[in-house]
Image (cartoon, helix red, strand yellow):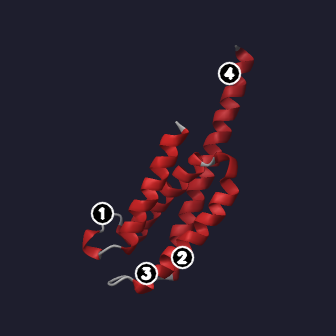
Amino acid sequence: MSIFVRFFAWLLAAAVTFATLGPPGLRPHSDLGQDGEHALAFILVGLAFGLAYRQRRLAVVTVAVILIGLLELMQFWAPGRHARLADFLVDAGTACIGFALAAVGDWVMTRFRASSALTS
């Protein structure tokens, strides 16, 4: 299961990277608006990496925020793209929320397993 989650996390990161740096015409669009699309994409990235790397979650979230900043800066050299501080804040913030959701999910599952072991 862990290998599948890690593969999915990296696949999702690659898709977000392509959507961020690729040609604007190939980027998927939705009714969520730009901030909503960014929030959804990066909350999923944070959740996926938070579940994929449970033992190193704090290190991974730190690296993720740095790489999100680097991804935003790389847009200076991508034709038709623009780097904005507001995008970085939405992306990094929602990725951190995704990591937090993964941590809460782990905590809930640990408590659930502990209580079900006690009742068995």
Q: Is residue 60 above or below residue 27?
A: above
Number of numbered labels in the structure image? 4
Pick the quarter of the image with the C terminus: top right
Three-letter amino acid code of the residue under disc 4: Ser
Kind of element beneath mark 3? helix
Kind of element beneath mark 4? helix
Q: Marks 4 and 1, how far apart in space? A: 42 Å
Q: Marks 2 and 4, how far apart in space? A: 44 Å
In which quarter of the view is residue 80 placed?
A: bottom left
Q: Residue at x 43, y 81 (%)?
A: 75
Other residues around mark 4 within 10 Å, as few (<14) / some (14–19) / many (≥20): few
- Mark 3 or 4, nearer chain start: 3
Three-letter amino acid code of the residue under disc 2: Leu
Q: Residue at x 61, y 42 (%)?
A: 105
The x, y position of residue 19, in whole percent, is 36, 68
Kind of element beneath mark 1? loop
Three-letter amino acid code of the residue under disc 1: Ser
Residue 32 shown left or right of residue 98 in the figure? left
Residue that mark 1 sits on: 30
The x, y position of residue 43, in whole percent, is 50, 58
Three-letter amino acid code of the residue under disc 3: Gln
